[in-house]
Image (spheres, coloured by chain):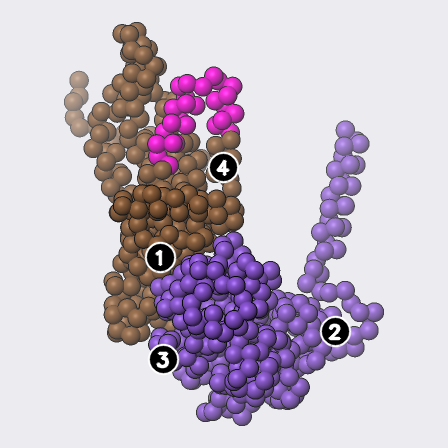
Chain colours: A brown, B purple
Amino acid sequence: MTTGTAGKIRAKARLGDRVFSGSTVVAGSLILVVLAAVAIFLAAQSIPAFLAPAGDLPNDAPNFWVYVWPLVFGTVWAAFLALLFALPISLGVALFISHYAPRRIAQGLGYIVDLLAAVPSVVFGLWGVTVLAPMLQPFYEWLNTNAGWFPLFGGDVSGTGRTILTVAIVLAVMVLPIMTAVCREIFLQTPKLHEEAALALGATRWEMIKMAVLPFARPGIISAAMLGLGRALGETLAVAMVLSPAVVVSFLLLTNQNSNTIAANIANQFPEAAGIGVNTLIASGLVLFVITFIVNAIARYAVNRRKAFSGAN
Amino acid sequence: MKISRIASIAGVALAATIVLSSCAANEGTPAGGESSSSLKGTLQGIGSSAQGAAETAWGTGFQTANDAVTVNYDPQGSGAGRTAFLTGAADFAGSDAALKTEELATVSPTCKAGTAPIDLPVYISPIAVAYNLEGVTDLKLDAATIAGIFKGTVTTWNDKAIADQNPDATLPSDKINVVHRSDDSGTTQNFTEYLVANAPDVWDAEAGQTYPYKVGDAAKGTSGVADATKNSKNSITYIDESGAEGLSIAQLKVGDAYSTISAEGAADVVSKSPIADGREANDLAIAIDRKITDANAWPMVLVSYFIACQEYADTDKGALVSAYAQYVASDAGQQAAATQAKSAPLSGDLAAKVVAAAATIK
């Protein structure tokens, strides 16, 4: 019996295989090329803004980082608030659809939540400005008078209700369908064996969810949250229409001096921008690109850390 | 099977007829098929959104008179428009500010080498100080009070500065809710220029497209500002007159008397202002005299320009732009813009100067 090293066994490949593998390679490299092109464009157009002398930048900023810091704060703060409102609700809706609702209602509710994702963001902006802000304004006044001692509710309350809290609510509504859809799919993938084992041992429905569904779904919930966070970070027109911005770093939720977000700032200033102003805006876009990249990297790390404990094993 | 085949062929033929007949969508209805114009071609303009409605009216009017011509205008913004013109992406630009000296020095590929672009004032829009205050319809304000309100030093409606000028009005003691633009805009530029000229001791910030003080609400665009003011009580803002429907407009102190906003007052100020110096002979960039004290003048005004080459590299294009610019500054064009966009038509002598300058474009 010969035990010599056999040559590598090649699988038989016909023309169809070659064409298919070639096209997948092309598709994969195309996306990398596009990403690289965008990154190079951003970097090249931003360099004049990084090197600009004081006095050339908008808002009288001495250097680029002073200009962009309030915008970065505003972007992260608005997205964080939106996620704070949206995540518990979307988990609740997803759990209701997957484990509590009767089948027919569950399918209908699923359709309706997906329909919310089809609404354009401009419509959300219009809704926020014309309906939500005036509706919330008396509530903000009440909150400011009675709970003004709480650090976030202090300051001069806005007369129009167009504050970062309203923007966070609008963003939460926009982000909800994506997160709910992903979470719903994850919860439905829970191994039936685990669920039934828990129930067989005497767990109630909530205990079964806590023991079998949620730990299995944790990486999926994190990815859903990151998807939602990505959308909230980049949302442009809804924020530009609803928010009343100023060049400040402010944690206050009820005033009309709110930190602007990077995307809304670009939408506001780009039409009238010229020269170094355009470079500054593109540089702030590069900063947003980097922030989203970092957020995604953290999410992937968090998911990979628990890979061994996912339900596949 | 046969019926459905016939039906599908008929359906395709019907759809094709409808689609192909709508191809000439940019043309207006030809007026009696009379136009004997020999002009043909396409003009691409980019620029100010303030001029947007007026440019639509001008484009339609010009195309009706010359049905072989197509005029396209993209209201991307004044900065974007000037950049596009200087890089050769547009045949003409609409801009709320005339070209600056460094922009004039740029060699645009659209223009013939060695010639410079020119600015023609074609659109005048009065800026109103509009407010939403219950029970008060004719507020009188002077420049110093306006500066104080918009800077945040005058905070309540019954402040002495306002009450002194309006002894008959019942002013509440509520806080004034200031609304301004969150985006860079030519309206803010002209408003702040007016305040810097007339109330420099109160308004110490420089004039610019960005609102300089951290006071009040900020809203995006003319419509955003109008909505914000209409939806909240006790608010005041500065806005293009065309967007101020539904709001009360304050009277402005000009000289010793209070004048009401009017198209003629605005056009009057522009025609009495000098042409900016250091420019080409046909470049009519105007240095608006904000301190004018004539009766019924309205110095809080925005002038928007039509930027074109003095000489085009392509002579056909030059002839087309010249004809279009002459139409825009003509009586017919200005009246069309006034009806559609509620702008102030150019006064007679300024219009004549603009038409003469436009005729030199080749």
Q: Can you identify the residue that label 1 sits on?
A: A257
Q: Can you identify the residue that label 4 sits on?
A: A116
| Residue in the picture at 34% in, 14% down | A205
Under circle 4, the secondary element is: helix
Q: Can you identify the residue that label 3 sits on?
A: B201
Q: In screen coordinates, is B256 left or right of A260?
A: right
Q: Can you identify the residue that label 2 sits on?
A: B65
Residue B344 lies, in percent from the top left, at 62, 76
Q: Is residue B213 above or below residue A1?
A: below
Under circle 1, the secondary element is: loop
Query: Can residue B45 be seen at all in this image of the molecule?
Result: no
Give me the chain letter of mark 2: B
Give me the chain letter of mark 1: A
Marks 1 and 3 close (CB-CB < 8 Å):
no
Q: What residue type is labelled 2?
A: Ala
Give me the chain letter of mark 4: A
Q: What residue type is labelled 3?
A: Asp
